[in-house]
Amino acid sequence: MLIVISGPSGVGKGTVCKKVSKLTGIRIAISATSREQRKGEKAERDYYFINEDEFKLRIERGDFLEYAVVYGHYYGTLKTEVAEGDVILEIDTQGAMKVLKNNPEVLSIFLLPPSMEELRNRIEKRGREPKEAIEARLKAAEAEIDIGKRRYKHVVTNDDSSKAAKEIADIIKQAESL
């Protein structure tokens, strides 16, 4: 089973996906990115860090299930990450639309923030970006939320990460029983 979990930047995808993985035993695919490794991140645990030239070469070779340019950096899922067993893809809506177009049977779950104000608070708390970047992320979030509500099979609000993870785990268990 291929499970796509998406949501706007700052909604808590990483936290929720880790909890879903613990509840279900389903592993999270490691994404590839061309951005620089951040403090505390570990290569091949958090991301496959690939420089932009190598990323483009691998796109040409057809190595990616999906990829997108997000905030100036490439992100994608290598086909090798989804070759065996059930897997969770924690990806943005651009990548998710590519996956869903080619694989309509995918279980798609969109993670909503409880409110736009709370989303702003979460992004600002990270303290990684200037005000202009925060505003760009919030503007993008509005469009992503619209897509999420229209195109995903399930929509879950992340007002509490444990509660959201439990709801998603229940959705997965229900889908497995069909």
Image (cartoon, rainbow, N blue to C red):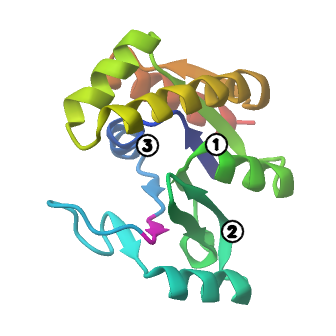
Query: Farthest front residue?
Result: 132
Residue located at (45% from left, 72% from top): 34
How busy is the neighbourhood of tag 1: few (under 14 within 10 Å), some, or many (20 plus)?
Answer: many
* Residue bounds of the magenta highlight: 30-34
Direction from residue 30 to residue 6 in the image, left or right: right
How busy is the neighbourhood of tag 2: few (under 14 within 10 Å), some, or many (20 plus)?
Answer: some
Q: Is residue 88 above or below residue 138?
A: below
Q: Does the stretch in magenta take in 58? A: no
Q: Inspect the image, locate mark 2, and give the three-letter code of the amino acid beneath it.
A: Leu
> Alpha carbon of mark 2 to alpha carbon of mark 3: how far?
23 Å
Task: Single out the mark in the foreground, 2 or 3.
Answer: 2
The foreground one among 153 and 172 is 153
Residue located at (32% from left, 63% from top): 46
Direction from residue 68 to residue 103 in the image, left or right: right
The residue that label 2 is drawn on is 65
Task: Single out the mark in the foreground, 1 or 2.
Answer: 1
> Alpha carbon of mark 1 to alpha carbon of mark 3: how far?
23 Å
Direction from residue 136 to residue 162 in the image, left or right: left
The residue that label 3 is drawn on is 24
Q: Inspect the image, locate mark 3, and give the three-letter code of the amino acid beneath it.
A: Thr
Mark earlier in primary sequence (1, 3) = 3
